Image (cartoon, helix red, strand yellow):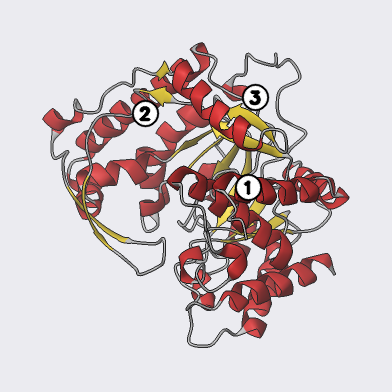
Protein backbone atom coordinates (compact mmCIF):
# COMPACT_ATOMS: atom_id res chain seq x y z
CA UNK A 1 0.00 0.00 0.00
CA UNK A 2 1.37 3.42 -0.96
CA UNK A 3 2.24 5.61 2.01
CA UNK A 4 0.41 8.92 2.09
CA UNK A 5 2.64 11.99 1.91
CA UNK A 6 2.40 14.94 4.28
CA UNK A 7 0.75 16.89 1.48
CA UNK A 8 -1.88 14.17 1.00
CA UNK A 9 -2.69 14.18 4.70
CA UNK A 10 -3.01 17.96 4.92
CA UNK A 11 -5.15 18.16 1.81
CA UNK A 12 -7.52 15.47 3.04
CA UNK A 13 -8.04 17.32 6.32
CA UNK A 14 -8.41 20.67 4.52
CA UNK A 15 -11.10 19.14 2.30
CA UNK A 16 -13.04 18.01 5.38
CA UNK A 17 -12.85 21.54 6.82
CA UNK A 18 -14.01 23.00 3.51
CA UNK A 19 -17.10 20.79 3.60
CA UNK A 20 -17.86 21.85 7.16
CA UNK A 21 -17.42 25.53 6.28
CA UNK A 22 -20.19 25.27 3.67
CA UNK A 23 -22.77 24.01 6.16
CA UNK A 24 -25.53 26.55 6.97
CA UNK A 25 -24.84 26.13 10.69
CA UNK A 26 -21.61 28.14 10.34
CA UNK A 27 -23.47 31.23 9.16
CA UNK A 28 -26.07 30.62 11.84
CA UNK A 29 -23.34 30.67 14.50
CA UNK A 30 -21.84 33.86 13.08
CA UNK A 31 -25.29 35.47 13.21
CA UNK A 32 -25.70 34.38 16.84
CA UNK A 33 -22.27 35.75 17.83
CA UNK A 34 -23.09 38.99 16.02
CA UNK A 35 -26.40 39.34 17.85
CA UNK A 36 -24.70 38.71 21.19
CA UNK A 37 -21.92 41.23 20.60
CA UNK A 38 -24.43 43.80 19.35
CA UNK A 39 -26.29 43.41 22.69
CA UNK A 40 -29.27 41.77 20.99
CA UNK A 41 -28.69 38.16 22.11
CA UNK A 42 -30.82 35.32 20.85
CA UNK A 43 -29.30 32.92 23.36
CA UNK A 44 -26.08 32.53 25.43
CA UNK A 45 -23.07 31.33 23.46
CA UNK A 46 -20.75 28.46 24.43
CA UNK A 47 -17.13 27.73 23.59
CA UNK A 48 -14.33 25.70 25.13
CA UNK A 49 -10.76 26.86 24.49
CA UNK A 50 -7.26 26.04 25.72
CA UNK A 51 -7.90 22.32 25.92
CA UNK A 52 -4.97 20.14 27.13
CA UNK A 53 -4.80 18.25 23.86
CA UNK A 54 -1.52 16.61 24.76
CA UNK A 55 -3.21 14.49 27.42
CA UNK A 56 -5.16 12.46 24.88
CA UNK A 57 -3.63 13.24 21.49
CA UNK A 58 -1.99 9.79 21.41
CA UNK A 59 -5.16 8.06 22.63
CA UNK A 60 -7.55 9.38 19.98
CA UNK A 61 -6.83 8.36 16.39
CA UNK A 62 -8.53 11.45 14.97
CA UNK A 63 -6.13 13.69 16.90
CA UNK A 64 -2.88 11.80 16.39
CA UNK A 65 -0.53 13.69 14.02
CA UNK A 66 1.35 11.60 11.46
CA UNK A 67 3.10 14.16 9.25
CA UNK A 68 6.89 13.92 9.28
CA UNK A 69 7.67 17.54 8.41
CA UNK A 70 7.53 19.82 11.48
CA UNK A 71 5.79 22.62 9.64
CA UNK A 72 3.17 20.30 8.18
CA UNK A 73 2.72 18.66 11.56
CA UNK A 74 1.72 21.98 13.11
CA UNK A 75 -0.88 22.58 10.40
CA UNK A 76 -2.11 19.00 10.73
CA UNK A 77 -2.57 19.40 14.48
CA UNK A 78 -4.58 22.59 14.01
CA UNK A 79 -6.79 20.95 11.39
CA UNK A 80 -7.34 17.77 13.41
CA UNK A 81 -8.31 19.73 16.51
CA UNK A 82 -10.74 21.89 14.57
CA UNK A 83 -12.34 18.80 13.07
CA UNK A 84 -12.50 17.06 16.45
CA UNK A 85 -14.30 20.01 18.02
CA UNK A 86 -16.78 20.12 15.15
CA UNK A 87 -17.47 16.39 15.40
CA UNK A 88 -17.53 15.92 19.17
CA UNK A 89 -17.98 19.15 21.13
CA UNK A 90 -21.39 20.81 20.86
CA UNK A 91 -20.41 24.49 21.01
CA UNK A 92 -20.34 27.68 18.97
CA UNK A 93 -16.88 27.47 17.43
CA UNK A 94 -17.13 28.61 13.81
CA UNK A 95 -15.49 26.86 10.86
CA UNK A 96 -14.82 29.18 7.92
CA UNK A 97 -13.43 28.41 4.48
CA UNK A 98 -10.38 30.58 5.14
CA UNK A 99 -6.91 29.88 6.49
CA UNK A 100 -5.17 33.00 7.76
CA UNK A 101 -1.38 33.16 7.59
CA UNK A 102 0.13 35.73 9.92
CA UNK A 103 2.25 38.39 8.28
CA UNK A 104 5.92 38.57 9.27
CA UNK A 105 7.08 41.68 11.12
CA UNK A 106 10.38 42.53 12.75
CA UNK A 107 11.20 44.86 15.62
CA UNK A 108 7.78 44.74 17.32
CA UNK A 109 9.13 43.71 20.73
CA UNK A 110 9.85 46.01 23.67
CA UNK A 111 13.43 45.14 24.60
CA UNK A 112 14.09 43.48 27.97
CA UNK A 113 14.70 39.73 27.94
CA UNK A 114 12.62 37.77 30.45
CA UNK A 115 14.51 35.68 33.02
CA UNK A 116 12.17 32.91 34.11
CA UNK A 117 12.02 29.43 35.55
CA UNK A 118 9.27 27.03 34.54
CA UNK A 119 7.78 23.96 36.11
CA UNK A 120 6.33 21.63 33.49
CA UNK A 121 2.90 20.11 34.10
CA UNK A 122 3.24 16.90 32.12
CA UNK A 123 1.23 16.95 28.91
CA UNK A 124 -0.61 20.11 29.97
CA UNK A 125 0.08 23.40 28.16
CA UNK A 126 -0.21 25.19 31.52
CA UNK A 127 3.08 25.80 33.33
CA UNK A 128 4.17 27.39 36.60
CA UNK A 129 6.46 30.40 36.18
CA UNK A 130 8.89 32.25 38.39
CA UNK A 131 10.37 35.53 37.17
CA UNK A 132 13.71 36.95 38.23
CA UNK A 133 13.64 40.76 38.08
CA UNK A 134 15.47 42.34 35.17
CA UNK A 135 13.95 45.76 35.87
CA UNK A 136 14.58 46.85 39.44
CA UNK A 137 14.79 50.64 39.51
CA UNK A 138 14.24 53.88 37.60
CA UNK A 139 17.49 53.44 35.70
CA UNK A 140 16.31 50.10 34.28
CA UNK A 141 13.08 51.51 32.83
CA UNK A 142 14.95 52.90 29.83
CA UNK A 143 15.66 49.33 28.75
CA UNK A 144 12.04 49.24 27.54
CA UNK A 145 12.49 50.28 23.93
CA UNK A 146 10.09 51.94 21.55
CA UNK A 147 9.51 49.33 18.83
CA UNK A 148 10.82 49.89 15.31
CA UNK A 149 8.40 47.83 13.28
CA UNK A 150 9.44 46.54 9.87
CA UNK A 151 7.24 44.51 7.56
CA UNK A 152 9.07 41.57 5.98
CA UNK A 153 7.25 41.27 2.67
CA UNK A 154 9.53 38.53 1.32
CA UNK A 155 9.12 36.26 4.35
CA UNK A 156 5.37 36.84 4.31
CA UNK A 157 5.20 35.96 0.60
CA UNK A 158 7.22 32.78 1.12
CA UNK A 159 4.98 31.69 3.95
CA UNK A 160 1.84 32.39 1.94
CA UNK A 161 3.24 30.50 -1.06
CA UNK A 162 3.97 27.46 1.12
CA UNK A 163 0.37 27.29 2.33
CA UNK A 164 -1.07 28.14 -1.09
CA UNK A 165 0.80 25.27 -2.73
CA UNK A 166 -0.20 22.90 0.04
CA UNK A 167 -3.97 23.49 0.09
CA UNK A 168 -4.79 26.88 -1.45
CA UNK A 169 -7.12 25.30 -4.01
CA UNK A 170 -9.20 23.85 -1.15
CA UNK A 171 -9.23 26.58 1.52
CA UNK A 172 -8.81 30.27 0.83
CA UNK A 173 -5.34 31.28 2.08
CA UNK A 174 -5.10 34.90 3.16
CA UNK A 175 -2.47 37.02 4.92
CA UNK A 176 -3.48 38.12 8.42
CA UNK A 177 -2.39 41.47 9.74
CA UNK A 178 -3.17 43.02 13.13
CA UNK A 179 -6.89 42.69 13.89
CA UNK A 180 -7.16 43.70 17.56
CA UNK A 181 -5.27 45.54 20.30
CA UNK A 182 -5.33 43.80 23.70
CA UNK A 183 -3.24 45.79 26.17
CA UNK A 184 -1.85 43.36 28.75
CA UNK A 185 0.68 45.74 30.30
CA UNK A 186 0.73 44.13 33.73
CA UNK A 187 1.07 40.62 32.33
CA UNK A 188 4.24 41.84 30.67
CA UNK A 189 5.62 44.11 33.38
CA UNK A 190 5.60 41.50 36.14
CA UNK A 191 7.68 39.24 33.90
CA UNK A 192 10.35 41.94 34.05
CA UNK A 193 9.97 43.04 37.68
CA UNK A 194 8.76 39.93 39.49
CA UNK A 195 5.17 39.67 40.72
CA UNK A 196 5.67 40.23 44.46
CA UNK A 197 8.13 43.04 43.84
CA UNK A 198 5.68 44.92 41.61
CA UNK A 199 2.80 44.64 44.06
CA UNK A 200 4.94 45.93 46.93
CA UNK A 201 6.13 48.82 44.78
CA UNK A 202 2.54 49.93 44.22
CA UNK A 203 2.65 51.04 47.86
CA UNK A 204 6.31 51.74 48.50
CA UNK A 205 7.41 53.23 45.17
CA UNK A 206 4.34 54.56 43.34
CA UNK A 207 6.38 57.06 41.30
CA UNK A 208 8.52 54.22 40.01
CA UNK A 209 5.45 52.22 38.98
CA UNK A 210 3.97 55.24 37.23
CA UNK A 211 7.23 55.75 35.33
CA UNK A 212 7.25 52.09 34.37
CA UNK A 213 3.64 52.15 33.15
CA UNK A 214 4.21 55.41 31.30
CA UNK A 215 7.16 53.97 29.43
CA UNK A 216 5.40 50.73 28.51
CA UNK A 217 2.20 52.51 27.46
CA UNK A 218 4.16 54.90 25.23
CA UNK A 219 5.93 51.92 23.66
CA UNK A 220 2.63 50.12 23.00
CA UNK A 221 1.00 53.23 21.52
CA UNK A 222 4.04 53.78 19.33
CA UNK A 223 3.70 50.25 18.00
CA UNK A 224 0.01 50.82 17.27
CA UNK A 225 0.94 53.97 15.34
CA UNK A 226 3.56 52.11 13.33
CA UNK A 227 1.21 49.23 12.54
CA UNK A 228 -1.28 51.81 11.26
CA UNK A 229 1.25 53.85 9.26
CA UNK A 230 2.64 50.71 7.61
CA UNK A 231 -0.89 49.53 6.70
CA UNK A 232 -0.43 46.37 8.77
CA UNK A 233 -3.89 46.60 10.35
CA UNK A 234 -6.39 44.17 8.91
CA UNK A 235 -10.10 43.88 8.31
CA UNK A 236 -11.67 43.19 11.73
CA UNK A 237 -13.81 40.52 10.09
CA UNK A 238 -13.63 37.68 10.84
CA UNK A 239 -13.10 38.00 14.58
CA UNK A 240 -12.61 34.43 15.79
CA UNK A 241 -11.71 35.51 19.33
CA UNK A 242 -11.68 38.74 21.31
CA UNK A 243 -9.59 39.22 24.44
CA UNK A 244 -9.91 36.22 26.72
CA UNK A 245 -13.46 35.50 25.61
CA UNK A 246 -15.39 34.27 22.62
CA UNK A 247 -15.80 35.35 19.01
CA UNK A 248 -16.00 39.03 18.15
CA UNK A 249 -18.33 39.05 15.16
CA UNK A 250 -20.32 42.29 15.23
CA UNK A 251 -22.24 44.63 12.96
CA UNK A 252 -20.71 47.59 14.80
CA UNK A 253 -17.26 47.12 13.27
CA UNK A 254 -15.73 48.40 11.10
CA UNK A 255 -16.92 52.01 11.26
CA UNK A 256 -19.27 53.29 8.55
CA UNK A 257 -16.53 55.51 7.10
CA UNK A 258 -13.87 52.75 7.03
CA UNK A 259 -11.81 52.41 3.86
CA UNK A 260 -10.86 48.78 3.08
CA UNK A 261 -7.10 48.42 3.05
CA UNK A 262 -6.65 51.51 5.22
CA UNK A 263 -7.92 50.12 8.50
CA UNK A 264 -7.66 52.03 11.78
CA UNK A 265 -7.80 50.95 15.43
CA UNK A 266 -11.25 52.57 15.63
CA UNK A 267 -12.40 49.90 13.15
CA UNK A 268 -11.16 47.09 15.40
CA UNK A 269 -11.58 45.51 18.81
CA UNK A 270 -9.39 46.63 21.70
CA UNK A 271 -9.18 45.70 25.35
CA UNK A 272 -7.05 45.32 28.43
CA UNK A 273 -6.48 43.23 31.53
CA UNK A 274 -4.36 43.63 34.68
CA UNK A 275 -4.75 40.09 36.03
CA UNK A 276 -2.47 40.51 39.03
CA UNK A 277 -4.72 43.31 40.32
CA UNK A 278 -7.24 40.81 41.67
CA UNK A 279 -6.80 42.00 45.25
CA UNK A 280 -5.81 45.60 44.44
CA UNK A 281 -8.35 48.23 45.50
CA UNK A 282 -10.52 49.99 42.91
CA UNK A 283 -8.66 53.25 43.55
CA UNK A 284 -5.24 51.68 42.95
CA UNK A 285 -6.58 49.72 39.99
CA UNK A 286 -7.76 52.99 38.49
CA UNK A 287 -4.51 54.84 39.22
CA UNK A 288 -1.94 52.23 38.20
CA UNK A 289 -3.76 50.34 35.45
CA UNK A 290 -6.97 51.78 34.04
CA UNK A 291 -5.77 55.33 33.41
CA UNK A 292 -3.08 53.93 31.10
CA UNK A 293 -5.26 51.21 29.58
CA UNK A 294 -7.85 53.78 28.55
CA UNK A 295 -5.24 55.49 26.36
CA UNK A 296 -5.18 52.33 24.24
CA UNK A 297 -8.87 51.48 24.42
CA UNK A 298 -9.94 55.03 23.53
CA UNK A 299 -8.49 54.43 20.06
CA UNK A 300 -10.51 51.26 19.44
CA UNK A 301 -14.03 50.78 18.14
CA UNK A 302 -15.20 48.29 20.79
CA UNK A 303 -13.46 46.99 23.89
CA UNK A 304 -13.21 43.82 25.98
CA UNK A 305 -11.99 44.06 29.57
CA UNK A 306 -10.55 41.53 31.96
CA UNK A 307 -9.44 37.94 32.21
CA UNK A 308 -8.94 36.07 35.49
CA UNK A 309 -9.28 39.05 37.84
CA UNK A 310 -12.65 39.53 39.60
CA UNK A 311 -14.21 42.85 38.57
CA UNK A 312 -17.39 42.98 40.64
CA UNK A 313 -16.10 45.75 42.93
CA UNK A 314 -14.67 47.78 40.07
CA UNK A 315 -17.66 48.40 37.83
CA UNK A 316 -17.73 52.09 38.73
CA UNK A 317 -14.25 52.70 37.38
CA UNK A 318 -14.90 50.51 34.32
CA UNK A 319 -17.70 52.90 33.43
CA UNK A 320 -14.91 55.23 32.23
CA UNK A 321 -13.85 52.87 29.43
CA UNK A 322 -15.07 54.17 26.07
CA UNK A 323 -17.16 51.73 24.04
CA UNK A 324 -16.73 48.91 26.54
CA UNK A 325 -18.78 46.02 25.21
CA UNK A 326 -17.61 42.78 26.89
CA UNK A 327 -16.48 42.09 30.49
CA UNK A 328 -14.77 38.96 31.76
CA UNK A 329 -16.68 37.28 34.58
CA UNK A 330 -13.99 35.09 36.15
CA UNK A 331 -14.59 32.14 38.50
CA UNK A 332 -13.88 34.50 41.43
CA UNK A 333 -16.32 37.19 40.33
CA UNK A 334 -19.56 37.86 42.24
CA UNK A 335 -22.00 37.91 39.33
CA UNK A 336 -24.89 39.57 41.15
CA UNK A 337 -22.66 42.34 42.47
CA UNK A 338 -21.31 42.90 38.95
CA UNK A 339 -24.86 43.34 37.65
CA UNK A 340 -25.66 45.74 40.49
CA UNK A 341 -22.63 47.86 39.64
CA UNK A 342 -23.24 47.97 35.89
CA UNK A 343 -24.65 51.23 34.55
CA UNK A 344 -25.43 49.82 31.10
CA UNK A 345 -25.65 46.45 29.35
CA UNK A 346 -22.45 44.51 28.68
CA UNK A 347 -21.75 41.06 27.34
CA UNK A 348 -20.88 38.98 30.38
CA UNK A 349 -18.02 36.71 29.30
CA UNK A 350 -18.44 34.00 31.92
CA UNK A 351 -15.42 31.83 32.72
CA UNK A 352 -16.66 28.75 34.63
CA UNK A 353 -13.97 27.24 36.82
CA UNK A 354 -11.90 24.68 34.88
CA UNK A 355 -11.18 22.91 38.17
CA UNK A 356 -14.40 20.95 37.76
CA UNK A 357 -12.78 19.12 34.83
CA UNK A 358 -9.75 18.15 36.94
CA UNK A 359 -11.40 16.42 39.91
CA UNK A 360 -11.09 12.70 40.66
CA UNK A 361 -14.53 12.21 39.16
CA UNK A 362 -16.27 14.62 36.83
CA UNK A 363 -19.57 15.84 38.29
CA UNK A 364 -21.58 16.87 35.26
CA UNK A 365 -24.66 17.78 37.28
CA UNK A 366 -22.65 20.25 39.38
CA UNK A 367 -21.07 21.74 36.26
CA UNK A 368 -24.51 22.24 34.73
CA UNK A 369 -25.88 23.79 37.92
CA UNK A 370 -23.03 26.30 37.94
CA UNK A 371 -24.11 27.51 34.49
CA UNK A 372 -27.75 27.72 35.62
CA UNK A 373 -26.72 29.78 38.64
CA UNK A 374 -24.58 32.11 36.53
CA UNK A 375 -27.44 32.67 34.10
CA UNK A 376 -29.87 33.45 36.92
CA UNK A 377 -27.49 35.87 38.63
CA UNK A 378 -26.73 37.64 35.33
CA UNK A 379 -30.30 38.99 35.37
CA UNK A 380 -30.74 39.29 31.64
CA UNK A 381 -27.28 40.51 30.69
CA UNK A 382 -26.09 39.03 27.36
CA UNK A 383 -23.92 36.01 28.23
CA UNK A 384 -21.24 33.80 26.76
CA UNK A 385 -19.73 30.80 28.55
CA UNK A 386 -16.04 30.29 27.83
CA UNK A 387 -14.34 27.28 29.38
CA UNK A 388 -10.63 28.12 29.32
CA UNK A 389 -7.36 27.64 31.22
CA UNK A 390 -8.03 23.90 31.33
CA UNK A 391 -4.75 22.55 32.70
CA UNK A 392 -5.90 18.92 32.94
CA UNK A 393 -8.88 16.67 32.38
CA UNK A 394 -7.01 13.74 33.91
CA UNK A 395 -6.52 12.29 30.44
CA UNK A 396 -10.28 11.87 29.99
CA UNK A 397 -11.55 13.61 26.86
CA UNK A 398 -15.09 12.45 27.69
CA UNK A 399 -15.24 15.13 30.39
CA UNK A 400 -14.78 17.87 27.81
CA UNK A 401 -17.44 16.34 25.59
CA UNK A 402 -19.90 15.95 28.48
CA UNK A 403 -19.38 19.54 29.69
CA UNK A 404 -20.04 20.94 26.22
CA UNK A 405 -23.09 18.74 25.66
CA UNK A 406 -24.71 19.69 28.95
CA UNK A 407 -24.08 23.42 28.64
CA UNK A 408 -25.03 23.59 24.97
CA UNK A 409 -28.31 21.78 25.57
CA UNK A 410 -29.03 24.12 28.45
CA UNK A 411 -28.51 27.37 26.51
CA UNK A 412 -30.32 26.08 23.42
CA UNK A 413 -33.37 24.88 25.37
| Above or below 43: residue 159 | above
State the CA–CA distance, disc 3 to disc 2. Answer: 21 Å
Pointer 2 residue: 217
Residue at 75% across, 67% down: 408
N-terminal of the two: label 1 or label 3?
Answer: 1
N-terminal of the two: label 2 or label 1?
Answer: 1
Residue 225 visible at all:
no
* Mark 1: secondary structure: helix
What percent of the width, then of the height, locates residue 139? 12, 29
N-terminal of the two: label 3 or label 2?
Answer: 2
User: Quarter-wise, where is residue 231 in the image?
Assistant: top right
What percent of the width, then of the height, locates residue 203? 22, 47
Residue at 36% across, 53% down: 276
Residue 20 visible at all:
yes
* Mark 3: secondary structure: helix
State the CA–CA distance, disc 1 to disc 3. Answer: 39 Å
Pointer 3 residue: 267
What percent of the width, then of the height, locates residue 39? 76, 45
What percent of the width, then of the height, locates residue 129? 27, 58
Do tag 3 and tag 2 residues touch (Cβ < 8 Å)?
A: no
Q: Is residue 216 left or right of residue 39?
A: left
In the image, which disc is placed on residue 8?
1
In the image, which disc is placed on residue 359?
none
Do tag 2 and tag 1 residues touch (Cβ < 8 Å)?
A: no
Q: In which quarter of the image is the C terminus?
A: bottom right
State the CA–CA distance, disc 2 to disc 1. Answer: 47 Å
* Mark 2: secondary structure: helix
Q: Nearer the viewer, mark 2 or mark 1?
A: 1
Residue at 61% across, 37% down: 166
Binning the other alpha carbons within 10 Å of mark 1 as few (below 14), some (14 to 19) or many (20 upward) gives: some
Nearer-the-camera pick, 108 or 251:
108
Amino acid sequence: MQKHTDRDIIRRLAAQLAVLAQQPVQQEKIALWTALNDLKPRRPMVWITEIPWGEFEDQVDALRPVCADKRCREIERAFRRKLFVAANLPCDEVVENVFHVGITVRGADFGPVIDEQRIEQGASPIQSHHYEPVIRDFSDIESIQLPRVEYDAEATARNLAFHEELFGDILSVRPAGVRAHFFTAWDQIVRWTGVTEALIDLVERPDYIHALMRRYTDAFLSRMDQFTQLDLLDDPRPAPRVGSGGAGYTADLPQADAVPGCWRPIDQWGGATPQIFSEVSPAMHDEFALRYEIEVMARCGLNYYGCCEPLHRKMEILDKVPRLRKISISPWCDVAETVAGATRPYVFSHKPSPAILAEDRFNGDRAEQDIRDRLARSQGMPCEFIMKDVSTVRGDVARVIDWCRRVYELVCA
